[in-house]
Amino acid sequence: MKKQASAALPSLLVAPLHTLGGNLRAARQARGWTIAEAAARSLVSPATYKRLEAGEPSVALGTWITVLHQLQLLDAVLAATAPQADALGEALRARKAPRRVRKSADEDARYDF
């Protein structure tokens, strides 16, 4: 019996993955592409493309990237995941930043002309 890939995925993440798949379906349909056309453009089988749109977690990341590129959505995903767009990450980096910069005596001596 084949193991369900979603069994290895925390239940909290199943719904967002299905939402992503649905969003890709909507993007494909807005472009007027059939599943066969979208699969051919992405160099995957129609069965794999259907699994992607169904939000199955076993679809390879490379397939997601290829499909996002074909739908011209890859740049938006990259922008959304950029460090500048990560408010939590920026706050954590700012909190860890040194408050004062100190130079050692050796460094001061280098600039003594």
Image (cartoon, grey):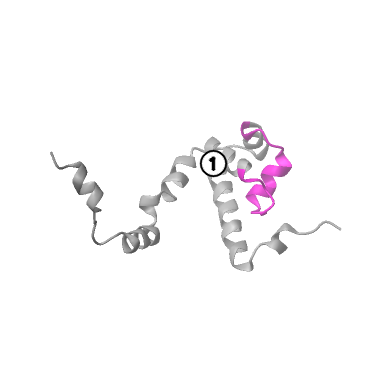
Check disc 1 and report the residue beneath it.
68
Seen from the viewer's position, the closer of residues 36 and 7 is 7
Q: Is residue 85 left or right of residue 8?
A: left
User: Residue shown at 35%/51% (left/top)?
Assistant: 84
Residue 24's x, y, as percent?
56, 47
Q: Quadrant of the C terminus?
A: top left
Examine the structure image and report whether residue 40 is included in the region drawn in magenta: no
State the extent of the magenta-drawn residues as a range: 41-61
User: Residue shown at 37%/62% (left/top)?
Assistant: 92
Residue 16 showing in the rendered view? yes
Residue 55 vertical position relative to residue 31 in the rendered view, above or below? below
Residue projecting furthest to the bottom: 11
Q: Is residue 63 left or right of residue 5?
A: left
Residue 66 vertical position relative to residue 82 in the rendered view, above or below? above
Q: Quadrant of the N terminus?
A: bottom right
Q: Is residue 28 left or right of residue 57?
A: left
